[in-house]
Amino acid sequence: MTERFMVSRRELLKTSAAGAALGLASASFPISRAFAAAVTVGFIYVGPRDDYGYNQAHAEGAATLKAIEGISVVEEENVPETVDVQKTMESMINLDGASLIFPTSFGYFDPHMLAMCAKFPDVQFRHCGGMWNKDKHPMNAGSYFGYIGMGQYLNGVAAGHATKTKKIGFVAAKPIPQVLLNINSFLLGARSVDPTITCQVIFTGEWSLAVKEAEATNALVDQGADVITCHVDSPKVVVETAAGRGAFTCGYHANQSPLAPEKYLTGAEWNWAKVYRMFVDDLVAGKPLPNFTRGGLADGFVKMSPLGPAVSEAARAQFDGTLAEMMKGGFSVIKGPLKNNKGDVVATEGQTFVEAAIELESMDYLVEGVVGSTA
């Protein structure tokens, strides 16, 4: 979108009275639509587009669409998970003629995106996450996501070779299934190198709390962790703080190697460009958009940051070999025999789970060797 709407977009629709005074209350805006491209796609971010993390990964994906003839991209950043996002979606439809909208943050879905789906049944909405259910949600809604746990497993392989203390650390936002899967995957990847490695996890309680993320990183280093990764919206603070303390780091969401070039081992990244192009191609071709879209490394939904200079030859060999196995499909991060960190059996001998099954099972445990609690 043009920068002139960055501040005023939500203000224009703050109240119906203000909208009516400006001639904007109607769902139809022929003057704006006359200047619209063949297809207008909207992207909404909960944080800044250059956060070196979750929002930047989506913005990088959106940027690839701008080079496609006939596609117009409108964006707004720093939109909170409140009624404000409804105003943003409504203005993208009414002012810009958007026919496909990607509200990218978890909290945008219910009730905000669902309210807009009902109000604008001819507009398509696709949400990043596992929220859509065909039995209770509208067909102009849907969800997309990637199986990035395998990326965190590969982070763990690199971490397992790099650690000297046999202690690795994880800064996490909230103990939801996807975060727990990432923590478990990181440790299990490291334990494929050395089964005595442990992982300390600290939950901050929010997706973006820079002070707590710095405090958690420092606490992990103080406790002996010498390789640290995370699952928060912007890994920037974690990466810079860890590297500043002399620890190695593995990234998440996007490539953070410019922040710590000597200490960055690798990172699990989203490749949303692949996903967004799939949706737009279907829209332009007049095909129905899928409501439930998933993929992993082999599907191009997820990718790994280049290995850093601190990664040893032995680590590179195991990393490359494991990645090759994952690219064949069917790789199991969670497999038996395996216990959780309370001593309960969660996978028996020979039992395996692919990541799609884990998503359906809604992981609610941390594996043996993770020092921390989901409570």
Image (cartoon, rainbow, N blue to C red):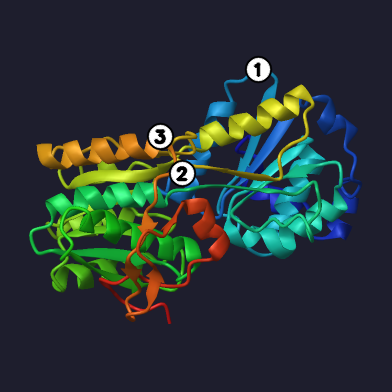
Q: CA distance from mark 2 to mark 3?
A: 29 Å
How far from the left and from the top, in percent, is residue 366?
A: 37, 71
Local secondary structure at mark 1: loop
| Observer-nearest of 14 and 310 | 310
Q: Which mark is residue 35?
A: none
Q: CA distance from mark 2 to mark 1?
A: 23 Å
Local secondary structure at mark 2: helix
Q: Residue furthest front?
A: 350
> For residue 242, what is the image quadrant?
bottom left
Looking at the image, is mark 2 or mark 1 earlier in the sequence?
2
Label 3: which residue? 328
How far from the left and from the top, in percent, is residue 142?
A: 70, 48
Q: Residues within 10 Å of mark 3 (few under 14, many from 20)?
A: few
Looking at the image, is mark 3 or mark 1 earlier in the sequence?
1
- Tell me whether the residue at label 2 lies in contact with that at label 1, contact meaning CB atoms closer than 8 angstroms: no
| Observer-nearest of 331 and 69 | 331
> For residue 74, what is the image quadrant?
top right
Q: Is residue 190 visible?
A: yes
Q: Which mark is residue 56?
A: 2
Q: Residues within 10 Å of mark 1 (few under 14, many from 20)?
A: few
Quarter occupied by the C terminus: bottom left
Q: Amino acid at mark 2?
A: Gln
Task: Tell me if 305 is positioned left or right of 50 in this view.
Answer: left
Label 1: which residue? 69
How far from the left and from the top, in percent, is residue 358?
A: 50, 59
Mark nearer the viewer, 2 or 3: 3
Q: CA distance from mark 3 to mark 1?
A: 34 Å
Q: Is residue 37 visible?
A: no
Q: Residue at x 57, y 21 (%)?
A: 67
Q: Answer above or below: position of 321 versus 292.
A: above
